[in-house]
Image (cartoon, grey):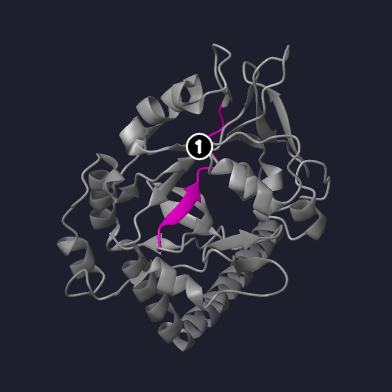
């Protein structure tokens, strides 16, 4: 298409105007940039510091993931500005949690036996262990931490052969010969006595339940492993509802932070002639009940961490879980 003289003149004027606008915009942009040089500078510094230690952090994470318990943290701490890895001094778990005890509402309660247990439907009991986030069930009177891996995500039979003896159960074998071998830093796991006494239908109060649980214990001398399950009493104790602890097998008001998970507990039920062996479990809901051991249900592995473990940071929320000193 041809342009006449008028068209050419008009186009020239249009291009000139556009050029002028571009020049003005560039001047304004440069002025703004000049006025914000400090902001740009500090932004770049922040970005640089956020990224400068990524390689060291990845290397350290790979070391721990490989199962090594005493990885060299020198280069990582030097990169982030610490002269050594003892700059952050950890606090022993029992001492750390003692001042967090409450008397009302959701939170950490002290029981008559000296144990500290998280009660309520919304509690800050998340903790990092073995490369993932677990939840603290209780802090024992001697300082050991009882923690539960609620993210296990497996539905298994309590015992595939129909036995109600925990020490010989297929689930016990699964947890201690397969799951245990996936754990990192297992040197801080404490092999405790598991209270596996069966629960009889006549039990009504939490104290009676605790008494029945301790009638049979499974220790290292009996071949007990490092991994178990929650006790029936752990589920009852986690609820704030009074009726739950005074009518342990019938109350439908045992809601707690555990209610959203559900799963088997260690304790079998009483033997009744003609009935198949059964064990207790809690469903996603508010009640403790029992079912045949050859049926599958959710599994929440439980371990104890030694009383010597220390907490160095975190507030127990899911986004900022407690961190153990390595």
Assign the C terminus to one quadrant of the image. Answer: bottom left
Q: Residues within 10 Å of mark 1 (few under 14, many from 20)?
A: some
Displayed quadrant of residue 287: top right
Left or right, 226 with respect to 260, comes to: left
93 vs 28: above or below: above
Q: Residue, x 21% and y 44% (percent of image)?
A: 68
Q: Position of residue 159 (x, y in %)?
A: 55, 19
Residue 84 % position (x, y): 17, 71
Please report the residue visible at 39 percent of the width from the left and 80 percent of the height from the top: 42
Up-down relation of residue 149 to residue 38 (above or below): above
Q: Residue furthest bottom?
A: 35
Q: Which residue is mark 1?
A: 216
The quadrant holding residue 183 is top left
In the displayed structure image, the side of residue 278 where residue 26 appears, left or right: left
153 within the magenta span: yes
Where the N terminus falls, by quadrant? top right
The magenta region covers 143-154
Q: Main secondary structure of the magenta part?
A: loop
- In this view, the residue in front, 140 or 213, is 213
- Decide if residue 247 is in sight here: yes
Instruction: Indicate whether 202 appears above or below 185.
Output: above
164 on left or right of 304: right
Q: Is residue 257 visible?
A: no
Residue at 22% from the left image edge and 46% from the top image edge: 63
Magenta-drawn stretch contains 286:
no
In percent of the image, x 46 and y 67: which residue is there? 314
Query: Residue 243 at what x, y percent from top left?
Result: 82, 55
């Amino acid at each position: 298409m041809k342009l006449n003289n008028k068209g050419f003149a008009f186009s020239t004027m249009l291009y000139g105007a556009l050029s002028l606008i571009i020049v003005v915009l560039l001047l304004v942009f440069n002025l703004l940039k000049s006025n914000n040089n400090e902001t740009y500078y500090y932004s770049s510094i922040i970005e640089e510091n956020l990224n400068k230690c990524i390689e060291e952090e990845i290397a350290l994470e790979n070391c721990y993931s490989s199962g090594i318990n005493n990885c060299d943290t020198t280069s990582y701490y030097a990169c982030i500005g610490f002269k050594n890895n003892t700059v952050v001094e950890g606090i022993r778990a029992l001492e750390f949690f003692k001042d967090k005890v409450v008397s009302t509402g959701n939170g950490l309660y002290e029981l008559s036996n000296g144990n500290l247990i998280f009660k309520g439907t919304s509690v800050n009991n998340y903790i990092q262990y073995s490369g993932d986030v677990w939840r603290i069930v209780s802090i024992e009177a001697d300082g050991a931490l009882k923690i539960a891996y609620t993210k296990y995500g497996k539905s298994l039979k309590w015992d595939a052969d129909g036995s109600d003896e925990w020490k010989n159960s297929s689930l016990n074998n699964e947890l201690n010969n397969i799951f245990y071998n996936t754990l990192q830093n297992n040197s801080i796991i404490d092999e405790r006595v598991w209270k596996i006494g069966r629960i009889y239908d006549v039990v009504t109060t939490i104290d009676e339940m605790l008494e029945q649980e301790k009638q049979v214990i499974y220790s290292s001398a009996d071949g007990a492993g490092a991994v178990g399950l929650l006790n029936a009493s752990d589920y009852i104790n986690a609820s704030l509802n009074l009726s739950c602890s005074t009518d342990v097998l019938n109350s439908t008001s045992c809601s707690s932070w555990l209610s959203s998970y559900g799963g088997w507990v260690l304790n079998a039920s009483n033997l009744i002639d003609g009935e198949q062996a059964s064990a207790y479990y809690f469903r996603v809901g508010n009640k403790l009940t029992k079912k045949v051991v050859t049926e599958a249900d959710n599994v929440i592995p439980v371990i104890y961490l030694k009383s010597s473990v220390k907490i160095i940071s975190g507030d127990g929320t899911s986004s900022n879980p407690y961190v153990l000193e390595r």
